[in-house]
């Protein structure tokens, strides 16, 4: 009965090898790291000045209308 289990053991190794290959393929993708220079896009931060839109808060005074 030990013979059948041995046959099954041969299959798992194949799957493991396949997974390892996949991992190796993902490694080359790491060089994409240089894409990080995209950080300069952060300067878009100046868009934050849009915060002045917050002054729209005065709309809150509309609350008194509830009265």
Image: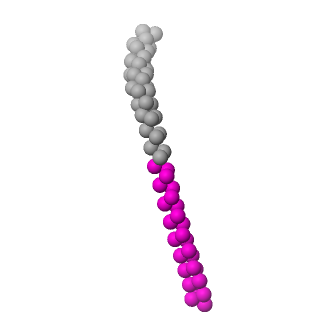
- Residues 40 and 3: in front is 40
- Residues 7 and 30: in front is 30
Q: Residue at x 47, y 46 (%)?
A: 40
Q: Residue at x 57, y 88 (%)?
A: 65
Quick check: is 47 in the magenta stretch? yes
- Residues 50 and 9: in front is 50
Rendered location of residue 4, percent (x, y): 41, 13
Q: Is residue 24 visible?
A: yes
Quadrant position of the C terminus in the picture: bottom right
Query: Along the horizontal axis of the image, is 20 left or right of 54?
Result: left
Vertical placement of residue 64 versus 3, above or below: below
Q: Quadrant of residue 60?
A: bottom right
Query: Along the horizontal axis of the image, is 21 left or right of 53?
Result: left
Number of on-image labels: 0
Rendered location of residue 8, percent (x, y): 41, 16
Query: Along the horizontal axis of the image, is 16 left or right of 57?
Result: left
**Dominant secondary structure, magenta:** helix
Q: Is residue 8 visible?
A: no
Q: Residue at x 41, y 19 (%)?
A: 17
Q: Residue at x 56, y 74 (%)?
A: 55
Vertical placement of residue 28 versus 4, above or below: below
Rendered location of residue 11, percent (x, y): 39, 17
Residue segment shown in magenta:
41-67
Q: Quadrant of residue 7?
A: top left
Quick check: is 65 in the magenta stretch? yes
Rendered location of residue 21, percent (x, y): 40, 22
Describe the colour scheme in one phrase: one colour
Quadrant position of the N terminus in the picture: top left
Vertical placement of residue 61 versus 32, above or below: below
């Amino acid at each position: 009965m030990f013979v059948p289990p041995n046959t099954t053991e041969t299959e798992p190794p194949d799957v493991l090898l396949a997974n390892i290959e996949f991992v190796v393929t993902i490694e080359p993708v790491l060089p994409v790291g240089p894409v990080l220079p995209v950080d300069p896009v952060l300067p878009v931060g100046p868009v934050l000045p849009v915060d002045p839109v917050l002054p729209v808060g005065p709309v809150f005074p509309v609350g008194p209308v509830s009265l």
